[in-house]
Image (spheres, rainbow, N blue to C red):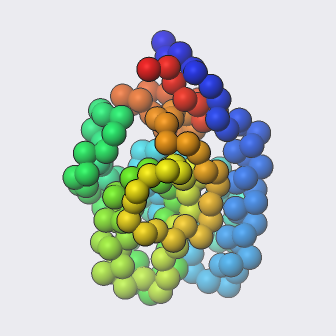
Amino acid sequence: MVKIKKILVTEEEIQKKLVEMGAAITEDYRGRDLLMIGVLKGAFMVMADLARHVDLPVEFDFMAVSSYGAATKTSGVVRILKDLDQEIEGRDVLIVEDIIDSGLTLHYLLKNLQVRQPESIEIAALLIKDGIDRPPLEVKYEGFHIPPEFVIGYGLDYAGKYRNLPYIAVMEE
């Protein structure tokens, strides 16, 4: 069993932030054709809960990308494991991320999706790791800034486990 070193973001803090983010998304996309794209596997919990706070008709799609494998640090090599099921040309796209770490995966994903000519493309991220050099990324809907530690919970895993924790935590080494 994993040992929790400390809880960084509580379940209550997460839910409160998702309500705020959902209200902002609702306001910004009113009257538009919004497609939320979740980056699997981590973003599934964030996207499900965030979408419940978006008071608009929204469509969903998912991509699966990998740059970690079973490691706790990115390999820097991004692979698309599952592509979108829908075309995004002319659509307003909101990429939903659980965490922005090195930013390499998201940077790659943005370049890949921009070629498909969406009307707009924005990012919503629950967590952003501070103190990390990364490609420039404009995150329109931000949750929490956290220290550069490996975290688990609320969709984030270690070796495929602990995604079901209702909070964000740092685990013991």
The quadrant of the rendering that contains the C terminus is: top left
Rendered image quadrant of residue 109 = bottom left
Residue 11 rendering spot, x and y as whole percentages: 71, 36
Residue 158 rendering spot, x and y as whole percentages: 41, 29
Report whether 156 appears left or right of 141.
Answer: left
Report whether 146 appears left or right of 79.
Answer: right
Please say whether residue 108 is visible from this viewpoint.
Answer: yes
Number of numbered discs visible in the structure rendering: 0
Against 94, residue 7 (above or below) is: above
Tell which of 70 and 138 is nearer to you.
138
At 64% from the left edge and 51% from the top edge, which residue is drawn?
Answer: 144
Residue 119 rendering spot, x and y as whole percentages: 47, 86
Report whether 162 appears left or right of 50.
Answer: left
At 31% from the left edge and 45% from the top edge, which residue is drawn?
Answer: 74
Against 33, residue 81 (above or below) is: above
Against 139, residue 129 (above or below) is: above
